[in-house]
Image (cartoon, rainbow, N blue to C red):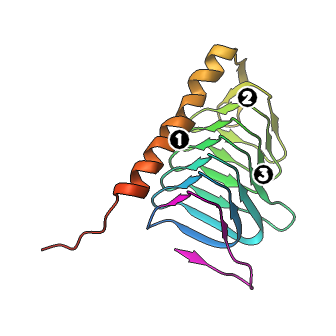
Amino acid sequence: MQYAFDNRNPKIGRNVFIAPTAVIIGDVTIKDNASIWYGAVLRGDMDPIKIGVNTNIQDNCTIHTDYGCPAIIGDNVSIGHNAVVHGCTIEDDCLIAINAVVLNGANIRKGSVVAAGSVVKEGQTVGPHQLVAGAPAVVKKTLSDAQFEVFGKAVFNYLDLAQAHLTRLMPRSPK
């Protein structure tokens, strides 16, 4: 479902999959080939949310903002199931894994990975090309090109899956 808030409407690019149970509110821009999965909530009621090309926001994620803290998510980013992304910047080619939390003012630089269950503190900068883990998140290593490619495959898997859902998902009434 998509909703306007204070006369601010979501702006949706081409070939975007939005699951029927996802909720998109207010000043949210979603660029081409992105996907917003089941139960995700993108609430642009305080400041803008921007979702880049080919980016996937997986099931039950929450993307929100604070006044003065927009949520800017770059191209080719995967946000894993149940992650919370709040008023921060995530640059291109990043992976935010399952149940991770990224707080206001954080900056996840290009090609970085936030491990499952990690918490990136307010104002913290990660990367580029770093793997962080823990609560609070600390640098575990710098990613090699080969490791970076492995993490990047999630984006392409979700591009294919989104196309399948765009073309084959059909509502069904119980008999």
Place of residue 157 in the rendered image (x, y in percent of width and height, measured from the top left): 48, 36
The CA span between labels 1 and 2 is 17 Å
Q: Where residue 116 is drawn, which disc sits there?
A: none
> What's the magenta region?
1-18
Place of residue 135 in the rendered image (x, y in percent of width and height, measured from the top left): 66, 37
Query: Which residue lies at the image location 79% right of the left edge and 35% below the top edge?
Result: 109
Place of residue 143 in the rendered image (x, y in percent of width and height, measured from the top left): 70, 18
Q: Earlier in the sequence, mark 1 or mark 3?
A: 3
Residue hosting label 2: 138
Place of residue 59 in the rendered image (x, y in percent of width and height, measured from the top left): 48, 53
Residue hosting label 3: 88
Please say if 154 is above or below 46: above
Q: Is residue 7 magenta?
A: yes
Q: Where residue 98 is drawn, which disc sits there?
A: 1
The three-letter code of the residue at mark 3 reads Cys
Question: With 26 as the anchor, is 150 left or right in this view?
Answer: left
Looking at this rendering, what residue extends furthest in the bottom direction? 7
Question: With 63 as the anchor, is 21 left or right in this view?
Answer: left
The three-letter code of the residue at mark 1 reads Ile
Disc 2 element: strand
Q: Is residue 29 magenta?
A: no
